[in-house]
Image: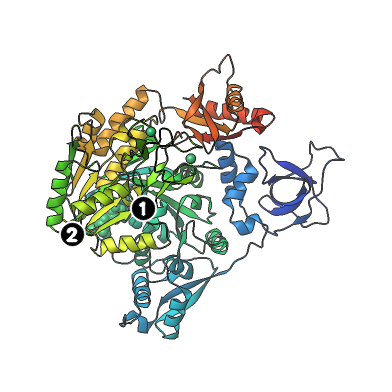
Amino acid sequence: MSFVEVAIKVPLHRTFDYKIDEQQPPLTPGMRVTVSFGNQKKVAVVLALKNTTDVPDNKIKQIIEVIDDQPILSTQHLDLLKFTARYYCYPLGETIHIALPAALRQGQCADKTSISMVSLSEKGEKLPSLKAKTQLNLLKQLANSGKSSLTELKALGFTKKTIDSLVTKGLIEQSIEYDNQWQQVAPTIGTKPTLNKEQAVACTSINQSSGFNSFLLEGVTGSGKTEVYLQCLENVLQRGDQALVLVPEIGLTPQTVNRFRRRFPDTPIMLWHSALTDNERLQTWRFCEKGSCAIVIGTRSSIFLPFLKLGMIVVDEEHDSSFKQQDTLRYHARDLAAYRAYRHKIPLILGSATPAFETLHKALNNKYQLLSLTERAQTSTDNQFQLIDMKSQPDQAGIAHASLAFMRQHLARGKQVMVFLNRRGFAPTLICHECGWLSECSRCSTSATFHKAIGQMICHHCGEQNNVPHQCPDCGSTQIFPNGKGTEQIEEFLMTEFPETPISRIDRDSTRRKGSLEKALDDINQGGARLLVGTQMLAKGHHFADVSLVLILDVDSGLYSCDFRATEHLAQLVTQVAGRAGRSGEPGQVLLQTHFPEHPLLQDLVNNGYQDFARFALQERNDAELPPVTNMAIVRAEGHNIKQVVDFLTDLVPVQGVSGIQLLGPIPAPLERVAGKFRFQLHIQAHDRPLLHQYLAQMVDYLSTNKLAQKVRWSLDVDPIDMI
Ligand code: ADP
Ligand code: ZN
Ligand code: ZN
């Protein structure tokens, strides 16, 4: 072989050939080399060896040097990356670049062999009383987890100083774990509950399956899904296999991780998330690859970790939108998990209380096996839903009289109350009482949000920030008022309404400082705050024992939206938020404020629950020929020159159409202008997936030679999950 085909990180949909120097060490696919590209020296990954090339003799360059003596990507792993690049129509070189830890992309040595772990010493296990609270907290954390890596402790806010002083006191020990192959024949299993019948059925179905099988584990929060994962993992570990557990970013709370560690005390479990350093990424990557790590609990990008012997993939909260990357390589970790499970011939468990319609559609068509957990494992109390009609209610920060009365009752019983509004700031706009002027962002087709506490108008899309005007810029009137509600306003109103009650607000503004979210959550759990006001951030995954009432304020915005997924997302959110109530032993109460109490989807959701709602709403999607019953891709384009943007997309639509493909557009994006740029879209739909991908591949080919494509910023989103 005298040539190699390599992938290089460049925004081009093609690979490149180079000549091999006979003097250099032998090459195999998956090894890194350096090559000269343009005037630069770049790291490239070998894809194949070839005898011939189309590049003329006088043009072909030699590779500069060989970096690895062994492939850093196995054939199987290269296959995953090639599939990803093809499926999402993204350049292979850039796909590999995104998947690899930084150290490997930059051409550094691939070996990293040790990791520092911290655990309690014998003396520390007695949990002696200590004056320093952080030191005591660290001991408690280690008592809970059994063992934590230095990195995790730092992520939890413990400093090196705290750790060192406990080492000096002989209360904790540091150990180095080496990159040996993990060979646990019979892993120690911590105490575990006996499964209820539905859990047992689920575990048996999963454990007895052979080869590739996808399972949708559908069960409300608290129904025991995690317990099913744990008991299936046991089986995987006993076979000496590895497992990947994908969780949304918020799922990596210490409670979750500690639960896994307590169950499998001598099993190497590693975490993968956005806060890891480059070095830690490389370590985890290598540990997985060598089989030294048995379980990885990770967020989205952990789907690209290499495993020596992968035995199972779990995707918890599989409906969560954080599994879809929203820029560059727009992959969906859940969908890639399905591909990986299929290629490795292993089971895939997708768990959710509110499955994505994509997943449910497959389950209802018997592509995935549906396993249901219908009862809460510990408490069997169901939440009571109630619709509060907002028509002709007085304007008191958007909270109805009836809602306030319920809040008083629950607070009087010593319970916690959660108020949920997915809009931060004080008010989404300011309005002029005399001429109707509305505060807008100067660079986006959207309003500028009024932030009262800091006296600023802020655009939530481009970040533009201005002082609050004292006069209307149009008519000069001083009669300008907040219009609409945000969490800041709700908090202010509730402070006057419940002056004795401690309130905690949780949104992106109140938790900007590092560690402030943890502190606020801690405070809520200690029972400090009784009234919790928050956005989406409050909705996800946190366990609050005392919340018995949840009030959802802005239901209507989800009912009437230009995004066809809005009702699905609303129902998921309502169900998730409602899951925060009713853990205190008594049934929780959930209030939904709406101007449309008779809306059929709301009625269905409230009376029959998400399961019923979803099946009904899925039928609607079917009738409207929308995903998941068809397949979709969106080409988005933006630029300062509106004509160029529109022309670029128009050029992609063949006059005579394409059989089997529906094209819609160019249409303005729901937010037509952001940061001064005009944004348009082209929607592409097809029932036949291979046909869609064939069409997209041709389109990308065409674009790589198209002049207009250089004038606008464009991107292609395959299986988009939001329309913005
Ligand atoms: P989910 O993942 O669906 O939210 P979990 O697995 O976390 O549910 O279970 C909720 C709670 O019930 C946990 O405290 C768990 O330990 C407990 N639990 C789960 N299964 C059982 C069981 N079969 N018997 C007793 N307790 C259980
Ligand atoms: Zn005015
Ligand atoms: Zn803006």
| Of callouts 1 and 2, the N-terminal one | 1
Q: Is residue 342 above or below residue 507?
A: above
* Res 458 quadrant in image: top left
Image coords of residue 10 (percent x, y) = 68, 43
Residue at 57% across, 50% down: 99
Image coords of residue 279 (percent x, y) = 57, 64
Residue at 41% across, 71% down: 147
Residue at 42% across, 57% down: 512
Q: Which amino acid does label 2 sit on?
A: Glu
Residue 500 - label: 2
Report how far apart the C-alphas of labels 1 and 2 lie in the structure: 21 Å
Q: Which amino acid does label 1 sit on?
A: Ala
The residue that label 1 is drawn on is: 453
Q: In this view, does 686 lie above or below 175?
A: above
* Res 440 quadrant in image: top left
Q: Does the residue labelled 1 lie within 8 Å of ligand 3?
A: no
**Residue 48 horizontal side relative to residue 394, left or right:** right
Residue 209 - label: none
Do callouts 1 and 2 mark residues in contact (Cβ within 8 Å)? Answer: no
Please rate how many residues cluster around mark 1, counting C-alpha atoms within 10 Å: few if below 14, some from 14 to 19, many from 20.
few
* Res 233 quadrant in image: bottom left
Q: Which of 529 and 99 is in front in this view?
A: 529
Image coords of residue 68 (percent x, y) = 70, 59
Using the rendered image of the protein, determine whether residue 223 is visible from the camera's viewpoint: no
Q: Is mark 1 on a helix, strand or loop?
A: loop
Using the rendered image of the protein, determine whether residue 457 is visible from the camera's viewpoint: yes
Q: What element carries label 2?
A: loop
**Residue 382 horizontal side relative to residue 4, left or right:** left
